[in-house]
Amino acid sequence: MLRSVLKSQSFSALAFVAFLCGGAQLARAAEDVLNLLHQGIPHDALYDVCFEGNNGIAVGVAGTVLNSSDGGASWQPEKPVTDQALLGITCSGASPIAVGQSGHVQVKAAEGWQVTTSGSDQRLLSVAADSSGLAVAVGGFGTVLRSRDSGRTWEQLPFDWEAILNDFLEPHIYDVSILDDGTLVIVGEFQLVLISNDRGDSWEVLNKASSSLFSVDFYDRQNGYAVGQDGTLIKTADGGSSWQMIKVPTRENLLDVWSSSGGEVFVSGIRTLLHSRDYGKSWESITAGDVPVKWYQAVAGLKKTGAPERVVMVGHSGRVLEINN
C-alpha cells in the first residue's frame, strides 16, 4: 500500500508522514525539555533541517526555506523558488543542496537558490554532500542520483534491484549519508543498508530484513545508527559492516536519528521523541508538549563532537523546537 501511495501524483509529503502513523505509546513525561523557536500555520510542515557551524537551514512544504545564522536560536523565512515540497537538505558540501518532489533540486549560490536539472521525476527524499563536490540524492522507486560538481549536474546510478531483493520491486530509498572518508551509506525499504567505498561506482548490501529504514546517521567513521518502522533501531560499531538491533521503548515509526561522539542520541518520529546519553544503551521517552500526539520529521544538532550545543527538531505546523538535553 505504501508503494502505491508514494507513486500517486496527488500524494503530498505531509500525507506520507501521516500515513506512517502507528499505535500509541505510554512513556514517562518530561517537563521543561522543549523550547519553541519557530511556529508556522497549521497547514505548514517542515521535513528536514541541517547545520554547518552556526548556520542552519530547514525546508518543507511548498518550497519553504527557513534560515538561521545564530546556531538555531532564531529562524527567518526566505522567498521560495519552487512550489514543490522540499523533503531533504544538506549543509555539508561546498553549497547547501535541497531536494524534493518531482525530482526537484536546488543549490544555494552567492546570488541565491538556483534550480538544477536532476534528470529524474521521482520524489527525492534525502541528499548528502561533502567538500569534494560529491553529492548523492535518493528517493522513490530505487532512485539514487550522484553529482560530482556540488549538485550542478546529476547522473542516475544503476542498481540490479531484482538481484538484491530477489523480486521485481524497486525499493524506496529514504536516506543517504556520506562519511568523513567518502564512504556512502544508503538505507530504505526492506531494512536495506547499502555501502559504497568508491564514491558510488559499486555497492555492497550489508543489511536486509522486513521493516523500512527511514534515516541513518554516523557520528564518526565507525559508529552509526539507523531507524525506521515499528520502533526499529539498528546500530553499527564497525563502519556499517554489521548491524545489531537495539531495543527502544516504543513501536512507533521512527523518522530521523542524530548522534554525537559524546554519547547523545536523539530520535524523532510519529508521536515519539527518544533520547539516550550513553550511546543507545538506555533510553528516555520524552512526552513533553505535543510530542505524544503529533509528528516531528527531522532532528539535528550543532556539532558531532562531545555534547551538542543545541539540538532542534522540525515537523508539523512549521514548528522548530529546541530539545533542552
Image (cartoon, helix red, strand yellow):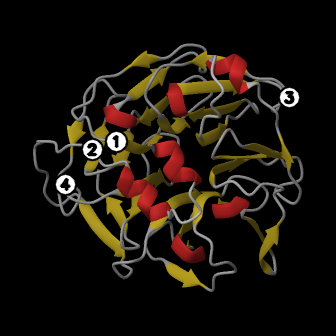
Residue on which disc 2 sits: 22
Mark 3 residue type = Asp
- Residue 94, by quadrant, is bottom right
Q: Check disc 3 and report its element: helix, strand or loop.
A: loop
Work out whether mark 2 precedes mark 1 in sequence or the reverse, and give the earlier one: 2
Q: Quadrant of the N terminus?
A: top left
Q: Amino acid at mark 1?
A: Asn
Q: Looking at the image, is mark 3 or mark 1 earlier in the sequence?
A: 3
**Which label lies toward us, 2 or 1?**
2
Secondary structure, mark 2, is: loop
Q: Is residue 303 visible?
A: no
Q: Secondary structure at mark 4?
A: loop
State how far apart marks 4 and 3 are (Cα): 43 Å
> Whole-Å distance between the Cαs marked 4 and 1?
13 Å
Horizontal side of residue 60 vs 325, given as left or right? right
Decide: is 263 above or below 71.
Answer: above
Check residue 184 in the rendering and tell me which mark sits there, or answer none.
none
Q: Secondary structure at mark 1?
A: loop
Q: Is residue 282 above or below residue 109?
A: above
Between 188 and 307, the one nearer to me in the picture: 188
**Residue that mark 3 sits on:** 201
- Considering only order in the chain, which callout, 3 or 4, is on the residue closer to the N terminus? 3
Residue bearing the label numbered 1 = 253
Which numbered disc covers residue 292? 4
**Whole-percent x and y of residue 177?**
64, 39
> First in sequence: mark 3 or mark 2?
2
Neighbour tally class for label 2: few under 14, some 14-19, many 20 plus, Cα within 10 Å: some
